[in-house]
Image (tube, rainbow, N blue to C red):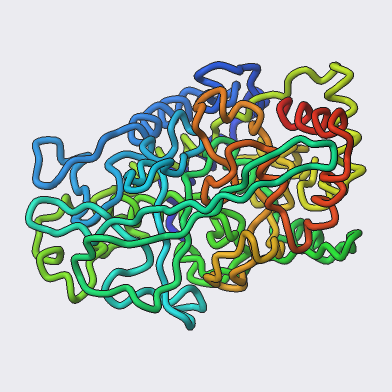
Amino acid sequence: MRRLTTFGLLLALASAAHAEPPLQTGVEEAGRQAFATPMAGLDAERSAAFLRGRSLFRQVWVIAPSRDEAVDGLGPLYNRPACTSCHPANGRGQAPEQPGQRMASMLVRLSLPGRGAHGGPLPHPVYGDQLNETGVPGVPGEGRARLVWTQTAFRFADGETASLRQPRIEFDELAYGSLDGVLTSARVGPPVFGLGLLDAVDDATLEALAAEPQADGVQGRVNRVWSPQASTPQVGRFGLKANVARLREQIAGALHGDMGITSTLHPRENCSAAQTACASTPNGGQPELSDAQLDDMETYLAYLAVPARRDLDAAVVRQGEAQFQALGCGGCHRPQLVTGERAADPRLRGLTIAPYSDLLLHDMGEGLADERPDYLASGRDWRTAPLWGIGLAQQLSSSAGFLHDGRARSLSEAILWHGGEALPARERFVALPRENRQALLAFLGSL
């Protein structure tokens, strides 16, 4: 018999109750708490778990051993000490602006050509699958990654100009040898609200969308990835290349990769055989994150509400919404998905949600390519980014960036980087009169 986690047990008990109020998955909030508000209608047990999970998400983890054994175990190698470091206000991270500026809310993925275990990326034998810049006392951090920007001027036919920047990754202070030949991908922290709703979309729904013919040669594909929770390949939906199958796995993987926190899904410290000082440091328990703590973090991220749209009746927003569809943007940025039986909580099933994503992989062209494969995703493939809440991103953090590496400083820049399957839609956007472009951007700002 499969053992239920505490999270699963709570859901099973709740589903047996007959008087649960319906969940309100959206929130009328546009201020600082827009991305951090729970769905209305949670029962007392889930509300308590949500608050515990929120505390863990905001917690600054400490080095073991410490007096507070519940939150020690940081490292031995890590990037940042708290989830909110890369997801400020539960929103987007940012890329460094100046040469030599440290990455505060982004990281660099690493791999070698070829395939690793279960068909995933092949980790570097010394540095693993991401650069951890910081180490606990006595353990050298792996090095420093910095971005060097190349600027390109762009001019619309009507004279409006834009500056498009593209990063090049350089490494300094490498502590464990050369990274020659390594494949890299810079990633900013993505927003974390609405993840429980995305987790609730059935695999069959995504597979049906992938089989559906689209205009302009658009053809979404599912990524099939290894699930450590199920010990079998599953359809991916989380991560910038849809390289993670379940929300619980996304949480545990981020804690392990970014902070060195072990769990039952990732029980080994993030040290390679060559990192001898790393392997000999004290840990914060085996594992450092208990299943109960992981349950609470899953509850927190599963029940974060999505900010409601704004200014729906404004004429410019309605015009921009029509423009969005006419350009072909909705072929990938699907306005609606429906959740299914995959959701453990019955109240998350059968809901029509508006993430403006199909959660599928699409070829986005050479300009956005990182040339780093990830399971079935090629170096040019990216998962369609959900657009819900995107209009509030820079209201909550003025320096928040768009696209996988934060290169785009505005939504207009982000559109101009679209290539590959999205090139026809991008070219239609470029050809629009300025008034129509502004209407489209007003619509995106309403999401």
- Percent of width and height locating residue 38: 53, 25
Residue in front for this viewpoint, 361 or 56: 361
Q: Is residue 12 left or right of residue 178?
A: right
Tell me if residue 225 comes above or below residue 403 in the rendering. Answer: below
Residue 96: quadrant of the picture: top left
Q: Is residue 179 left or right of residue 283?
A: right
- Percent of width and height locating residue 123: 38, 74
Q: Quadrant of the C terminus?
A: top right
Q: Is residue 41 left or right of residue 100?
A: right
Tell me if residue 280 comes above or below residue 376 in the rendering. Answer: above
- Percent of width and height locating residue 233: 56, 71
Tell me if residue 38 comes above or below residue 404 in the rendering. Answer: above
- Report whether residue 19 is seen: no
Number of labels in the image equals 0
- Report whether residue 40 is seen: yes
Residue in front for this viewpoint, 174 or 10: 174
Residue that extends furthest to the bottom in the rendered view of this protein: 114
At a point 46% along the width and 62% down the height, the residue shown is 229
Residue in front for this viewpoint, 269 or 100: 100
At a point 24% along the width and 40% down the height, the residue shown is 61
Q: Is residue 363 left or right of residue 277?
A: right
At a point 18% along the width and 75% down the height, the residue shown is 274
At a point 36% along the width and 46% down the height, the residue shown is 103
Residue 222: quadrant of the picture: bottom right
- Percent of width and height locating residue 410: 63, 36
Tell me if residue 115 comes above or below residue 5 in the rendering. Answer: below
